[in-house]
Image: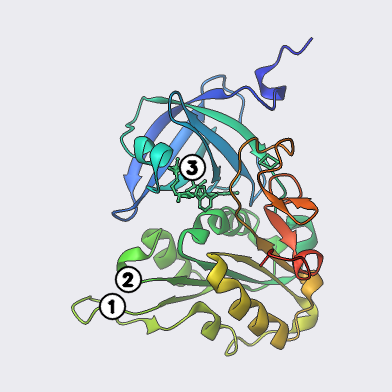
Amino acid sequence: METSPVKSLYTPRQAEIISVTALTPEEKLFCLKMVDGVDLCHLPGQFVQLSLPGFGEAPISITSSCSHDGCFELAIRRAGFLTGEMHTKVAGDIVGIRGPFGSFFPVDEFAGMDLILVSGGCGLAPMRSLIKHCEDYRDRFGTVHILYGARSPDHLLFKGDLAAWQGSAGFSCGIIVDSAPSAACYEGATGFVQTLIPPLDIDPTRTAAAIVGPPVMYKGVIDELLAKGIPAERVYISLERNMRCGVGKCGHCAIDHLYCCTDGPVFRLDKVMGLKGAI
Ligand SMILES: Cc1cc2nc3c(=O)[nH]c(=O)nc-3n(C[C@H](O)[C@H](O)[C@H](O)COP(=O)(O)OP(=O)(O)OC[C@H]3O[C@@H](n4cnc5c(N)ncnc54)[C@H](O)[C@@H]3O)c2cc1C
Ligand code: FES
Protein backbone atom coordinates (compact mmCIF):
# COMPACT_ATOMS: atom_id res chain seq x y z
CA MET A 1 0.00 0.00 0.00
CA GLU A 2 1.31 3.47 -0.93
CA THR A 3 1.59 5.58 2.20
CA SER A 4 4.13 8.30 1.45
CA PRO A 5 2.74 11.33 -0.42
CA VAL A 6 6.28 11.95 -1.64
CA LYS A 7 6.24 8.69 -3.60
CA SER A 8 2.93 9.34 -5.39
CA LEU A 9 3.33 10.61 -8.95
CA TYR A 10 -0.29 11.74 -9.11
CA THR A 11 -1.08 13.30 -5.74
CA PRO A 12 -0.08 16.93 -5.31
CA ARG A 13 1.69 17.79 -2.07
CA GLN A 14 1.00 21.09 -0.37
CA ALA A 15 3.55 23.89 -0.56
CA GLU A 16 3.34 27.23 1.23
CA ILE A 17 4.26 30.45 -0.53
CA ILE A 18 6.97 32.09 1.57
CA SER A 19 7.47 35.22 -0.54
CA VAL A 20 6.47 36.76 -3.87
CA THR A 21 8.71 39.18 -5.82
CA ALA A 22 7.83 40.96 -9.06
CA LEU A 23 10.53 40.34 -11.69
CA THR A 24 8.85 42.22 -14.58
CA PRO A 25 5.24 43.35 -15.15
CA GLU A 26 4.55 39.82 -16.52
CA GLU A 27 6.70 37.57 -14.31
CA LYS A 28 6.80 36.93 -10.58
CA LEU A 29 9.23 34.92 -8.49
CA PHE A 30 7.63 32.64 -5.90
CA CYS A 31 9.64 31.18 -3.04
CA LEU A 32 7.91 28.06 -1.67
CA LYS A 33 8.39 25.46 1.02
CA MET A 34 6.87 21.96 1.18
CA VAL A 35 4.38 21.79 4.06
CA ASP A 36 5.34 18.17 4.89
CA GLY A 37 8.94 19.30 5.38
CA VAL A 38 10.32 16.91 2.74
CA ASP A 39 12.48 18.84 0.26
CA LEU A 40 12.03 18.49 -3.49
CA CYS A 41 15.68 17.39 -4.02
CA HIS A 42 15.58 18.38 -7.68
CA LEU A 43 18.38 18.65 -10.22
CA PRO A 44 18.96 21.63 -12.56
CA GLY A 45 16.50 21.66 -15.48
CA GLN A 46 13.71 19.66 -13.82
CA PHE A 47 10.15 20.93 -13.44
CA VAL A 48 7.16 20.54 -11.12
CA GLN A 49 3.45 20.35 -11.88
CA LEU A 50 1.94 23.33 -10.06
CA SER A 51 -1.77 23.05 -9.20
CA LEU A 52 -4.43 25.39 -7.86
CA PRO A 53 -7.83 23.90 -6.96
CA GLY A 54 -10.35 24.85 -9.65
CA PHE A 55 -7.63 26.15 -12.00
CA GLY A 56 -5.84 22.95 -12.99
CA GLU A 57 -2.15 22.23 -13.34
CA ALA A 58 0.80 23.58 -15.29
CA PRO A 59 4.43 22.50 -15.67
CA ILE A 60 6.82 25.09 -14.21
CA SER A 61 10.62 24.83 -14.12
CA ILE A 62 12.38 25.05 -10.80
CA THR A 63 14.60 28.13 -11.00
CA SER A 64 16.62 27.67 -7.81
CA SER A 65 19.42 25.18 -7.19
CA CYS A 66 18.77 22.25 -4.90
CA SER A 67 17.65 23.72 -1.61
CA HIS A 68 19.93 24.74 1.22
CA ASP A 69 17.07 25.93 3.41
CA GLY A 70 14.11 23.81 2.37
CA CYS A 71 12.83 26.44 -0.06
CA PHE A 72 12.58 26.34 -3.83
CA GLU A 73 11.76 29.04 -6.37
CA LEU A 74 9.44 29.23 -9.40
CA ALA A 75 9.47 32.17 -11.85
CA ILE A 76 6.02 32.34 -13.40
CA ARG A 77 4.83 34.35 -16.40
CA ARG A 78 1.16 35.37 -16.39
CA ALA A 79 0.12 33.42 -19.51
CA GLY A 80 -3.47 32.33 -18.91
CA PHE A 81 -5.94 30.69 -16.53
CA LEU A 82 -3.73 29.04 -13.90
CA THR A 83 -0.73 31.35 -14.08
CA GLY A 84 -3.06 34.38 -13.93
CA GLU A 85 -4.58 33.03 -10.71
CA MET A 86 -1.10 32.24 -9.36
CA HIS A 87 -0.20 35.92 -9.81
CA THR A 88 -2.94 36.82 -7.27
CA LYS A 89 -1.35 34.62 -4.58
CA VAL A 90 0.53 36.05 -1.61
CA ALA A 91 2.81 34.79 1.15
CA GLY A 92 1.04 32.23 3.33
CA ASP A 93 -1.16 30.84 0.53
CA ILE A 94 -1.01 27.11 -0.20
CA VAL A 95 -0.54 25.55 -3.68
CA GLY A 96 -0.19 21.96 -4.94
CA ILE A 97 3.10 20.54 -6.22
CA ARG A 98 3.84 17.24 -7.98
CA GLY A 99 7.37 16.30 -8.88
CA PRO A 100 10.17 17.09 -9.47
CA PHE A 101 9.85 15.53 -12.92
CA GLY A 102 11.87 15.13 -16.09
CA SER A 103 15.48 14.89 -17.15
CA PHE A 104 18.11 17.38 -16.03
CA PHE A 105 21.33 18.96 -17.20
CA PRO A 106 24.12 16.37 -16.77
CA VAL A 107 26.10 18.23 -14.12
CA ASP A 108 28.39 15.22 -13.51
CA GLU A 109 29.32 15.08 -17.22
CA PHE A 110 29.86 18.86 -17.18
CA ALA A 111 32.38 18.58 -14.33
CA GLY A 112 35.84 19.74 -15.39
CA MET A 113 34.53 21.34 -18.60
CA ASP A 114 34.09 24.92 -19.73
CA LEU A 115 30.42 25.73 -20.21
CA ILE A 116 28.42 28.00 -22.51
CA LEU A 117 24.94 28.52 -21.03
CA VAL A 118 22.63 30.26 -23.51
CA SER A 119 19.14 31.36 -22.56
CA GLY A 120 16.47 33.61 -23.98
CA GLY A 121 13.42 35.24 -22.39
CA CYS A 122 11.72 33.02 -19.79
CA GLY A 123 14.39 30.38 -20.52
CA LEU A 124 16.58 32.06 -17.93
CA ALA A 125 14.27 30.53 -15.28
CA PRO A 126 15.35 26.90 -15.81
CA MET A 127 18.87 28.00 -16.79
CA ARG A 128 19.19 29.84 -13.48
CA SER A 129 18.94 26.51 -11.62
CA LEU A 130 22.01 25.32 -13.56
CA ILE A 131 23.88 28.62 -13.06
CA LYS A 132 23.09 28.50 -9.30
CA HIS A 133 24.39 24.90 -9.23
CA CYS A 134 27.64 26.12 -10.88
CA GLU A 135 27.82 28.87 -8.22
CA ASP A 136 27.33 26.34 -5.41
CA TYR A 137 30.00 23.97 -6.79
CA ARG A 138 32.16 26.55 -8.57
CA ASP A 139 35.44 24.59 -8.41
CA ARG A 140 33.90 21.61 -10.28
CA PHE A 141 33.63 23.56 -13.56
CA GLY A 142 36.01 25.50 -15.81
CA THR A 143 35.09 28.85 -17.34
CA VAL A 144 31.33 29.39 -17.31
CA HIS A 145 30.00 31.72 -20.03
CA ILE A 146 26.45 32.93 -19.36
CA LEU A 147 24.73 34.40 -22.44
CA TYR A 148 21.24 35.84 -22.06
CA GLY A 149 18.94 37.56 -24.53
CA ALA A 150 15.61 39.29 -23.93
CA ARG A 151 13.14 41.23 -26.06
CA SER A 152 13.88 44.59 -24.44
CA PRO A 153 15.54 45.96 -21.28
CA ASP A 154 12.13 45.78 -19.54
CA HIS A 155 11.92 42.05 -20.30
CA LEU A 156 15.24 41.12 -18.64
CA LEU A 157 14.55 38.62 -15.84
CA PHE A 158 16.59 38.37 -12.62
CA LYS A 159 18.34 41.73 -13.08
CA GLY A 160 19.99 41.41 -9.64
CA ASP A 161 21.45 38.00 -10.50
CA LEU A 162 22.60 39.22 -13.91
CA ALA A 163 24.46 42.15 -12.32
CA ALA A 164 26.06 39.79 -9.78
CA TRP A 165 27.16 37.34 -12.50
CA GLN A 166 28.56 40.19 -14.59
CA GLY A 167 30.60 41.34 -11.60
CA SER A 168 31.72 37.85 -10.58
CA ALA A 169 35.20 36.49 -11.32
CA GLY A 170 33.55 33.05 -11.53
CA PHE A 171 31.54 33.83 -14.66
CA SER A 172 31.66 35.66 -17.95
CA CYS A 173 28.19 37.07 -18.56
CA GLY A 174 26.95 38.57 -21.83
CA ILE A 175 23.54 40.24 -22.00
CA ILE A 176 21.78 41.42 -25.12
CA VAL A 177 18.29 42.68 -26.03
CA ASP A 178 16.55 42.51 -29.41
CA SER A 179 16.04 46.25 -29.35
CA ALA A 180 15.91 49.05 -26.80
CA PRO A 181 13.45 51.97 -27.06
CA SER A 182 15.39 55.22 -27.35
CA ALA A 183 13.86 56.39 -24.05
CA ALA A 184 15.22 53.36 -22.16
CA CYS A 185 18.24 53.82 -19.89
CA TYR A 186 20.11 50.98 -21.55
CA GLU A 187 23.68 51.11 -22.81
CA GLY A 188 24.17 47.38 -23.42
CA ALA A 189 24.29 45.33 -26.61
CA THR A 190 21.38 44.94 -29.02
CA GLY A 191 20.74 42.01 -31.37
CA PHE A 192 20.05 38.29 -31.01
CA VAL A 193 21.72 36.18 -28.35
CA GLN A 194 23.60 33.96 -30.85
CA THR A 195 25.71 36.98 -31.91
CA LEU A 196 27.44 36.72 -28.49
CA ILE A 197 28.84 33.26 -29.35
CA PRO A 198 31.42 33.90 -32.17
CA PRO A 199 33.59 36.33 -30.09
CA LEU A 200 33.97 33.77 -27.23
CA ASP A 201 37.50 32.45 -26.81
CA ILE A 202 36.86 28.74 -26.19
CA ASP A 203 38.55 25.37 -26.57
CA PRO A 204 35.86 23.21 -28.23
CA THR A 205 37.53 20.00 -27.09
CA ARG A 206 36.71 20.83 -23.48
CA THR A 207 33.50 22.83 -23.81
CA ALA A 208 29.86 21.78 -23.34
CA ALA A 209 26.78 23.92 -23.88
CA ALA A 210 23.21 24.21 -22.64
CA ILE A 211 20.34 26.10 -24.31
CA VAL A 212 16.91 27.13 -22.99
CA GLY A 213 14.66 29.63 -24.68
CA PRO A 214 11.80 30.22 -27.09
CA PRO A 215 11.74 27.89 -30.14
CA VAL A 216 12.68 30.76 -32.49
CA MET A 217 16.04 31.05 -30.74
CA TYR A 218 17.26 27.47 -31.15
CA LYS A 219 18.39 27.26 -34.77
CA GLY A 220 20.62 30.35 -34.69
CA VAL A 221 22.19 29.39 -31.36
CA ILE A 222 22.78 25.75 -32.38
CA ASP A 223 24.37 26.83 -35.70
CA GLU A 224 26.83 29.12 -33.88
CA LEU A 225 27.74 26.50 -31.24
CA LEU A 226 28.38 23.85 -33.91
CA ALA A 227 30.38 26.41 -35.93
CA LYS A 228 32.58 26.85 -32.85
CA GLY A 229 33.42 23.14 -33.12
CA ILE A 230 31.37 21.95 -30.13
CA PRO A 231 29.96 18.51 -31.06
CA ALA A 232 26.18 17.98 -30.85
CA GLU A 233 26.80 15.27 -28.22
CA ARG A 234 27.98 18.01 -25.86
CA VAL A 235 25.08 20.39 -26.49
CA TYR A 236 21.97 20.03 -24.29
CA ILE A 237 18.67 21.73 -25.01
CA SER A 238 15.50 22.07 -22.95
CA LEU A 239 12.26 21.81 -24.94
CA GLU A 240 8.74 22.93 -23.97
CA ARG A 241 5.55 21.12 -24.94
CA ASN A 242 1.96 21.28 -23.72
CA MET A 243 1.73 18.78 -20.88
CA ARG A 244 -1.01 17.12 -18.84
CA CYS A 245 0.17 14.22 -16.67
CA GLY A 246 3.89 15.08 -16.56
CA VAL A 247 4.78 11.44 -16.02
CA GLY A 248 4.67 9.75 -19.44
CA LYS A 249 1.08 8.46 -19.37
CA CYS A 250 -1.14 10.76 -21.45
CA GLY A 251 0.89 11.36 -24.62
CA HIS A 252 0.19 15.13 -24.75
CA CYS A 253 3.85 16.08 -24.87
CA ALA A 254 5.03 13.66 -27.58
CA ILE A 255 7.97 14.65 -29.77
CA ASP A 256 8.11 11.87 -32.37
CA HIS A 257 8.74 8.71 -30.27
CA LEU A 258 9.86 10.68 -27.20
CA TYR A 259 7.88 12.24 -24.35
CA CYS A 260 8.99 15.72 -23.36
CA CYS A 261 7.95 15.11 -19.73
CA THR A 262 9.96 11.94 -19.09
CA ASP A 263 12.62 11.75 -21.86
CA GLY A 264 13.01 15.54 -21.51
CA PRO A 265 12.61 18.42 -21.04
CA VAL A 266 16.45 18.37 -21.27
CA PHE A 267 17.66 16.49 -24.36
CA ARG A 268 21.11 15.86 -25.83
CA LEU A 269 21.07 17.68 -29.16
CA ASP A 270 22.21 14.75 -31.33
CA LYS A 271 19.29 12.66 -30.00
CA VAL A 272 16.61 15.13 -31.18
CA MET A 273 18.08 17.16 -34.04
CA GLY A 274 16.75 14.71 -36.66
CA LEU A 275 13.29 14.36 -35.14
CA LYS A 276 10.43 16.02 -37.00
CA GLY A 277 9.09 19.06 -35.13
CA ALA A 278 11.57 18.80 -32.26
CA ILE A 279 13.40 22.06 -32.86
C1 LIG B 1 8.74 21.75 -18.95
C2 LIG B 1 8.06 23.09 -18.91
C3 LIG B 1 8.54 24.07 -18.07
C4 LIG B 1 7.91 25.31 -17.97
N1 LIG B 1 8.44 26.24 -17.14
C5 LIG B 1 7.83 27.42 -16.99
C6 LIG B 1 8.33 28.40 -16.08
O1 LIG B 1 9.35 28.18 -15.40
N2 LIG B 1 7.67 29.56 -15.96
C7 LIG B 1 6.53 29.83 -16.72
O2 LIG B 1 5.97 30.92 -16.55
N3 LIG B 1 6.05 28.94 -17.61
C8 LIG B 1 6.66 27.75 -17.76
N4 LIG B 1 6.15 26.83 -18.65
C9 LIG B 1 4.98 27.19 -19.45
C10 LIG B 1 3.72 27.04 -18.61
O3 LIG B 1 3.53 25.67 -18.27
C11 LIG B 1 2.51 27.53 -19.37
O4 LIG B 1 2.62 28.93 -19.57
C12 LIG B 1 1.24 27.25 -18.55
O5 LIG B 1 0.91 25.89 -18.70
C13 LIG B 1 0.12 28.11 -18.95
O6 LIG B 1 -1.00 27.72 -18.13
P1 LIG B 1 -2.25 28.68 -17.92
O7 LIG B 1 -3.36 27.86 -17.36
O8 LIG B 1 -1.87 29.89 -17.17
O9 LIG B 1 -2.55 29.14 -19.38
P2 LIG B 1 -3.72 28.58 -20.35
O10 LIG B 1 -4.93 29.36 -20.03
O11 LIG B 1 -3.77 27.10 -20.34
O12 LIG B 1 -3.09 28.96 -21.76
C14 LIG B 1 -2.52 30.19 -22.09
C15 LIG B 1 -1.80 30.06 -23.41
O13 LIG B 1 -0.56 29.33 -23.22
C16 LIG B 1 -0.51 28.20 -24.08
N5 LIG B 1 0.24 27.15 -23.40
C17 LIG B 1 -0.19 26.33 -22.42
N6 LIG B 1 0.82 25.49 -22.05
C18 LIG B 1 1.88 25.81 -22.82
C19 LIG B 1 3.24 25.32 -22.93
N7 LIG B 1 3.69 24.31 -22.21
N8 LIG B 1 4.04 25.91 -23.82
C20 LIG B 1 3.62 26.92 -24.59
N9 LIG B 1 2.37 27.41 -24.54
C21 LIG B 1 1.52 26.88 -23.67
C22 LIG B 1 -1.93 27.84 -24.37
O14 LIG B 1 -2.02 27.12 -25.59
C23 LIG B 1 -2.57 29.24 -24.45
O15 LIG B 1 -2.37 29.83 -25.69
C24 LIG B 1 6.77 25.59 -18.77
C25 LIG B 1 6.29 24.60 -19.62
C26 LIG B 1 6.91 23.37 -19.71
C27 LIG B 1 6.39 22.33 -20.64
S1 FES C 1 2.53 15.12 -20.23
FE1 FES C 1 1.52 13.21 -20.28
S2 FES C 1 2.93 11.98 -21.41
FE2 FES C 1 3.99 13.83 -21.11
Q: Position of residue 258 (x, y in %)?
A: 78, 52
Q: Reading the chain from its start, which is encountered first: label 2 or label 3? A: 3
Q: In which quarter of the image is residue 178?
A: bottom left
Q: In this view, does 91 lie to the left or right of 56?
A: left
Three-letter amino acid code at the position of disc 3: Glu
Question: What element does badge 1 sit on?
Answer: loop
The residue most toward the bottom is 199
Q: Quadrant of the N terminus?
A: top right
Cα distance in 3D space between marks 2 and 1: 7 Å
Identify which residue is drawn at 65% across, 55% down: 137
Q: Reading the chain from its start, which is encountered first: label 2 or label 1? A: 2
Quickly name the residue at label 1.
186
Q: Is residue 132 above or below residue 37?
A: below
Mark 2 CB within 8 Å of ligand 1: no
The residue most toward the left is 183
Q: Position of residue 221 (x, y in %)?
A: 60, 77
The answer to whether residue 73 shows anywhere in this view is yes
Residue 153 shows which numbered tag?
Answer: 2
